Amino acid sequence: MPQFVVEADGGSRGNPGPAGYGSVVLDPVTGETLAERAEYIGVATNNVAEYKGLIAGLKAARELDPDAVVLVRMDSKLVVEQMSGRWKIKHPDMKPLAAEAAKVMPRAQVTYEWIPREKNKHADRLANEAMDAGKRGKQWEPSNSSAALAALDASAARTLATPQGPPGDAAKGAAAVRAALASGGGTRTRAGAAAGARAGSAPAGADTLFGDPADLADVVGPADLADLAGPADLAAAPASGPDTAAAAVPATGASGVASTGTAPAPAAGQGWGPDMGPPATFVLLRHGETALTPQKRFSGSGGSDPELSAAGRRQAAAVAESLAARGTIETVISSPLRRCRETAQAVADRLGLTVTVEEGLREVDFGAWEGLTFAEARERYPEDLQAWLDSPKAAPTGGGESFASATRRISATRDRLLAEHAGRTVLLVSHVTPVKILVRLALGAPPEALFRMELSAASLSAVAYYADGNASVRLLNDTSHLR
């Protein structure tokens, strides 16, 4: 029976924002493009666009031959795992889309595989073209070469496809597709190569890993955290009241989270996507105590820059021993503030490493609230404090930094460090707010989650960033043994 490969992608410039999808049906032996689909869908999220790309691709394959075995390849771990039945679908926006995708073709005829983003450039290009067309107030139209390829009728598609086994045997069919790709199949004909060349020059904005950093602080949607984080063992942080700078964040041992799309490409002729490879893991360490920490006073980048207290130095030494026992830290990076540099140096000395200072890891500036307790700030600046609690865009009194601004700064720092340290385990020594923001973004949680985390001094949190954009976080916040 015929066999097709469907590659699909979707993107949103803003997440949510102007969105579009692209999908392509390929012959697994020749690599030829049998059909292309793309559409601008208005304002939507990345996940919605990805599902719509999947649906369009499956429908295109069905139009070519409703009896075909289809191997779907996508760089969305969420869609692949949910459609394969390994992850539950809890998000209300995803359920109807997944149900629609499941109805396009019989389940026995469709299998799913994750591929790294660099192997999904054709569909990514189409999604970008659709979004570009939408920006001009138009819908996507195929180029001349694309239209010619898409015009292949069902009989031509059946001729190109390789027969394999009885109808409905998706497992055998998918195995045959993989074998064809791995044995050198999938080499494009001239028309297919032209499509690949276009894909290589595509803009990179269709499906950014974290969306536009300028919009991250404003995303509050009802995303289901279990869906976004995958099947990782996520520990729930205890709800607590509003945080002061010293009241702090969660901590953890080691774990995995989303990556930067830096998974190595397969060797020529290998044909099939490799596994995701080692993640870039950020071990997040909050600095040890200062004199202000036990008093729970605001202590940001605009204050007195206090040193570690005696208790804080003991904590730094203890966490250094703990990390040395693990033996996994390869690089130590610190906020420029004194309490972090002292904590980082204690660890680096124990591990035989040097400390690199990163300005982007500094604590926010709490303006006129620096040195005050939460109660004192509420008494002196009640309206400003309430506005700060109500909106991530509100800044502390006297020119402090808002959470929205901090999120843009920290997410940009994260992306740059991920690119520089792909596949490595890096210790980031920072503060309450930066650690909370990194954990929040990894979980896909809304901004108000910052006030529902507690982070002890010298506590550890680990976020591993995988090549498919997924994140897992484990938190360990009890550091009483370090005092």
Image: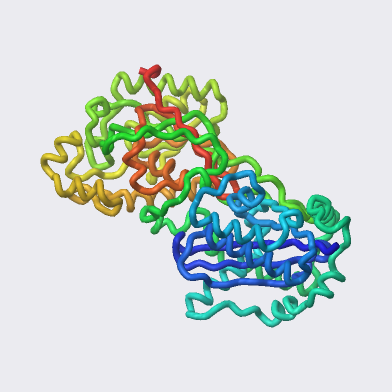
Residue shown at the point (72%, 72%) measured from the top left: 35
The answer to whether residue 181 is seen in the rendering is no
Q: Nearer the viewer, residue 330 or 203?
A: 203
**Quadrant of the snapshot with the N terminus:** bottom right
Compared with residue 144, is residue 205 higher up or lower down, i.e. above or below?
Answer: above
In the shown orientation, is residue 113 left or right of residue 406?
right
Could you tell me which residue is drawn at 87 percent across and 71 percent down? 159
Residue 265 to residue 428: above or below: below
Where in the figure is residue 241, as x and y percent of width and height?
27, 36
Whether residue 398 is visible: yes
- Front residue of 16/462: it is 16
Q: Is residue 418 rendered to the left or right of residue 54? A: left
Considering every residue shown, the one lying at the far left of the view is 380
Look at the picture and state if 284 lies above or below 13. Answer: above
Q: Residue furthest bottom?
A: 144
| Circle count | 0
Tell me where residue 73 appears, x and y as whole percent: 69, 57
Tell me residue 269's x, y (percent).
Answer: 81, 55
Coloring basis for residues: rainbow
Please report the residue visible at 27 percent of the width from the left and 49 percent of the height from the top. 401
Q: Quadrant of the C terminus?
A: top left
